[in-house]
């Protein structure tokens, strides 16, 4: 019985690992973040290394790893405010959360007039990084992507 349970558990883990995972964060009644992660495939990518550490992929800095090859990447991010949907800039964002555990409590919304500021962080247990997006009118941009602890804990934690 134990062997059957172990085989079933391993099969489910392998099946779920190769599929996209989507999470949603409700920041306010009409403000929702949606993130999709997928398995990272290094084939066909330009991987830059320094002392065996992965430092860039396709000429973009890598966030979310401790120098190892990423296992997953943030495939898509959207911010929905009422009926307006913004595509979030997610390039360079890897290993955003650990398997099925996503911590939605690290995301915060700050509204300044008509400007929406979204602050949050991603981590799969190592390689924590912070991000900030600003949406205003028809536009949205990523204003911060960092693994600098000073920025994350002094600026981002105060928001």
Image (cartoon, rainbow, N blue to C red):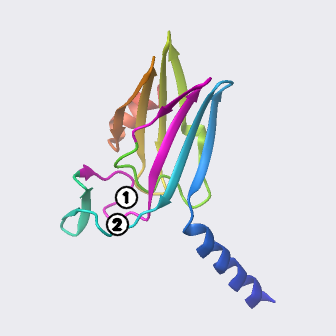
Q: Residue 69 bears which disc, if any?
A: 2
Locate residue 81, reporting x and y percent: 58, 25
Q: Residue 65 bears which disc, if any?
A: 1
Classed neighbour count for the residue bearing mark 1: other residues with Cα under 10 Å, few (<14), some (14–19), many (≥20): many
What residue do we see at 49% from left, 29% from top?
118
Locate residue 54, reporting x and y percent: 26, 62
Residue 159 visible to the viewer: no
Query: Who is closer to the viewer here, 90 or 130?
Result: 90
Looking at the picture, does residue 31 appear above or below residue 131?
above
Locate residue 84, reporting x and y percent: 55, 25
What residue do we see at 31% from left, 53% from top?
62
- Range of magenta residues: 60-89
Classed neighbour count for the residue bearing mark 2: other residues with Cα under 10 Å, few (<14), some (14–19), many (≥20): many
Task: Give the left or right position of residue 102, taking residue 63 as reference.
Answer: right
Looking at the picture, does residue 82 appear above or below residue 52?
above
What's the distance in space between the residues labelled 2 and 1, CA to CA? Answer: 7 Å
């Amino acid at each position: 019985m134990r062997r059957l349970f172990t085989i079933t558990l391993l099969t489910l883990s392998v099946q779920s690992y190769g599929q996209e995972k989507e999470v949603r964060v409700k920041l306010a009644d009409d403000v929702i973040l949606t993130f999709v992660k997928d398995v990272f495939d290094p084939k066909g990518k330009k991987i830059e290394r320094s002392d065996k550490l992965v430092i860039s992929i396709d000429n973009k800095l890598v966030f979310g790893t401790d120098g190892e090859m990423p296992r997953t990447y943030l495939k898509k991010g959207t911010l929905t405010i009422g009926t307006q949907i913004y595509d979030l800039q997610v390039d360079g964002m890897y290993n955003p959360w650990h398997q099925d555990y996503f911590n939605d409590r690290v995301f915060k919304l700050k509204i300044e007039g008509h400007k929406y500021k979204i602050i949050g962080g991603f981590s799969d247990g190592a390689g924590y990084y912070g991000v900030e997006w600003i949406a205003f009118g028809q536009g949205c941009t990523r204003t911060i992507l960092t693994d600098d602890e000073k920025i994350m804990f002094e600026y981002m934690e105060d928001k």
